[in-house]
Image (tube, rainbow, N blue to C red):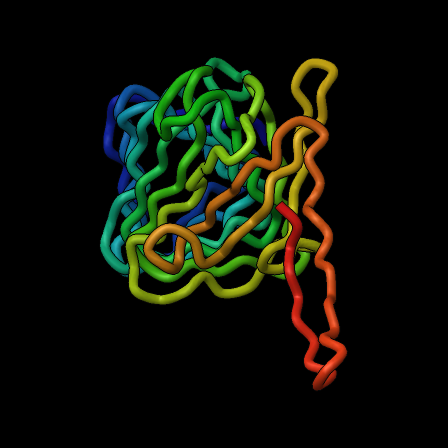
Amino acid sequence: TGSTYINAAKVVITASANFGNSTNIVLNFGGTLSPSNNNFMSSSQALTMTAGSILDAAGYSSTIGNLVFDCGYLGLAATNETITVAGTVASVTNGKPAAGILPMTGNLTISGGYQAYLGGMTAGTGSTCYTQLRINGNVAVGGSSALSLVLGGPTPMGAQYTILSNLGVQPISGTFSGIPQGGSVQGTYGASNYTLTVSYTGGDGNDLVLTSLGAGGNQPPIVSIVTPTDGTMYTTTPA
């Protein structure tokens, strides 16, 4: 039990090896984890990565527990790796929620949840930006996975946040629990509640984009209108 730390070094996991009973694998100070086998971690083991750290799992796949990226711009970078996160994907700075960038070349499945930090209008690092996953590969969302928000500031009406930039050509597979295309997710900042609509087809057609309805925002109702002449029904959304 406990944590295994990889500090400013490259660790290669040989065939059939794993981290045994360690509950948390921590990559620090540019540390690199390079497995040479599948299932190098388990759903009960969390992976924490600090800035400059790399998981180089080229060609291999594994399920992990929580995936936490700490202090900024990280590299979950390899070719054709497949990572399934059974826990929650989240960004922090020194253990507290904050924005971060996580680029990945490979396939990502989110089975547990995604906690996105929104503190500003730009994807980046720190408390005044917002979290973004940048995935160059296939992206899947498990039907029981949850999308949650931590707000570091108000989200103005109409503001958009691309919390998952899908650089691949395939659409996002699946949706978060209770949030279909066009659904909504809520967050709180201060005494105000904010509602943001969710699109899995945003950006260039396959990005996960949130659009704020402002403080206390609600999705506008859809009004149906029937013309008296031919009975044709039209729908409109009030401005």
Horizontal arrangement in the rendering, residue 104 relative to residue 108 (left or right):
left
In the image, 102 versus 163, the foreground residue is 163
In the image, 138 versus 167, the foreground residue is 167
Q: Quadrant of residue 141?
A: bottom right
Q: Residue at x 46, y 17 (%)?
A: 93
Q: Residue furthest front?
A: 229
Q: Quadrant of residue 237?
A: bottom right
Residue 47: x and y in percent read 47, 36
In the image, 143 versus 130, the foreground residue is 130
Relative to 142, does residue 86 appear above or below in the rendering?
A: above
Q: Residue at x 37, y 62 (%)?
A: 138
Q: Residue furthest bottom?
A: 230
Q: Residue at x 66, y 66 (%)?
A: 235
Residue 68: x and y in percent read 48, 32
The answer to whether one can see residue 182 in this image is yes
Residue 67: x and y in percent read 49, 38
